[in-house]
Image (cartoon, rainbow, N blue to C red):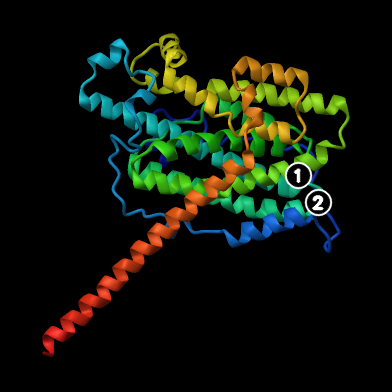
């Protein structure tokens, strides 16, 4: 079935074209590179996986409760509209919310793939080109698994959110080679990681938990890559150049904060936009969710050297300033550990099935030959 048949409303155009700017850069130095970045490149090669095989696609998913997350996570919960809804209506709402969330993940991953390819083209250092090539493959795999989940298990997609599209466009239109790093690796990837983690840690459904855990294992490397590359480069910039990038971060963070309302979902249920925005703004769960979503971005921005007065004031206004002290390395290590634990559990279960199968065969042979 065509994707366009599954959209809640079809995008205006089948493709989105962004004029390319900036230069493609070649490096003729093939012998040397930064040890940390080359080690990350090696890890990127070692950790490649096949989305068709590593994910247990045979697991059943209830399309009317795909994620098993609390009803409180939906901004309509507790309102006069919620009180009138039947169980079937609530199931349809859960389906729409899951579709909206994973559709934005899918569109964001395609954006990450394009940005990673742009970094391969424009970054001046060969070690960074090497790693970006592995990330491009990672992002293609993520888009593959999110797309398959939406097509095969949910059966519904939402178009890209306007604010996410705006940030992607700003990131890709900028001719400076570091901007795809800043827009994608730090802002969009950082926010996506926190969103993935919130759902991964609250869902009781094994298939989305697998998908999110394995994707996050890759994303931990991507954010580390952005930190390494930008931390080195931003030490060389003037105060004016740093302030320009801080302004980009401020605008991007406000766009991302405002993206996380899910107003499109409520509009599909006949609720006027202004009323839907009010429900989103007043939802205690979503207020906490929006705050926690910056748990990966704020410490990363601080770490790479963007921490001017205007940026700090913006984070105070958003209520996320204190997150600058979060231990980003610890968060990333936890993401990798969770994926490795899932793998260990899966391998143990498969080994148990093989042992049981052999024991059954032996027992069957003994019974035939007393």
Q: Give the position of the N terminus as an image quadrant.
A: top left
Q: In this view, does 116 lie above or below 4?
A: below
Q: Can residue 127 be seen in this view?
A: yes
Camera-nearest residue between 153 and 343: 343
Camera-nearest residue between 186 and 366: 366
Residue 52 position, x and y percent, is 43, 57
**Left or right for 280, reference 368:** right
Q: Can residue 260 be seen in this view?
A: no
Q: Point out the frontmost of discs 2 and 1.
A: 1
| Mark 2 or mark 1: whose residue is earlier in sequence | 2
**Dot 2 corresponds to which residue?**
125
Camera-nearest residue between 229 and 18: 229
**Left or right for 159, reference 78:** right
**Could you say whether the residue bearing mark 2 is in a helix, strand or loop?**
loop
Q: Which residue is drawn at 52% across and 32% down?
A: 13
Q: In the rendering, which numbered label is found on residue 229? A: 1
Q: Which residue is drawn at 67% across and 35% down?
A: 300
Residue 243 position, x and y percent, is 80, 24
Q: In the rendering, which numbered label is found on residue 214? A: none
Separation of disc 2 and disc 1 at Cα?
10 Å
Q: Give the position of the C terminus as an image quadrant.
A: bottom left
């Amino acid at each position: 079935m065509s994707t366009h048949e599954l959209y809640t409303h079809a995008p205006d155009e089948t493709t989105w074209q962004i004029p390319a700017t900036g230069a493609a850069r070649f490096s003729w130095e093939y012998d040397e590179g930064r040890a940390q970045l080359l080690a990350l490149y090696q890890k990127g090669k070692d950790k490649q996986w096949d989305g068709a095989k590593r994910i247990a696609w045979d697991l059943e998913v209830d399309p009317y409760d795909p994620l098993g997350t609390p009803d409180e996570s939906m901004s309509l919960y507790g309102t006069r509209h919620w009180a009138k809804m039947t169980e079937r209506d609530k199931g349809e709402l859960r389906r729409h919310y899951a579709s909206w969330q994973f559709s934005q993940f899918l569109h964001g991953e395609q954006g990450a793939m394009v940005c990673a390819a742009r970094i391969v083209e424009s970054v001046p250092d060969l070690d960074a080109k090497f790693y970006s090539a592995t990330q491009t493959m990672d992002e293609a795999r993520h888009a593959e698994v999110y797309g398959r989940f939406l097509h095969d298990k949910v059966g519904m997609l939402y178009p890209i959110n306007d604010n996410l599209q705006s940030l992607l466009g700003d990131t890709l239109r900028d001719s400076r080679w570091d901007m795809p790093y800043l827009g994608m690796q730090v802002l969009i990837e950082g926010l996506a990681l926190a969103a993935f983690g919130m759902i991964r840690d609250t869902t009781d459904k094994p298939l989305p938990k697998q998908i999110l855990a394995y994707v996050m294992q890759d994303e931990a490397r991507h954010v580390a890559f952005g930190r390494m590359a930008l931390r080195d480069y931003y030490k060389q910039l003037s105060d004016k150049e740093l302030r320009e990038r801080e302004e980009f971060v401020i605008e991007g963070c406000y766009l991302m904060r405002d993206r996380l309302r899910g107003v499109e979902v409520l509009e599909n249920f006949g609720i006027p936009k202004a009323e839907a925005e009010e429900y989103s703004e007043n939802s205690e769960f979503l207020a906490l969710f929006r705050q926690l979503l910056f748990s990966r971005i704020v410490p990363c921005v601080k770490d790479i050297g963007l921490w001017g007065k205007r940026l700090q004031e913006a984070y105070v206004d958003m209520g996320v300033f204190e997150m600058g002290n979060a231990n980003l390395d610890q968060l990333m290590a936890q993401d990798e550990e969770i994926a490795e634990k899932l793998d260990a559990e899966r391998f143990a279960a498969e080994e148990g099935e093989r042992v049981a199968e052999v024991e059954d065969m032996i027992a069957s042979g003994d019974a035939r030959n007393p």
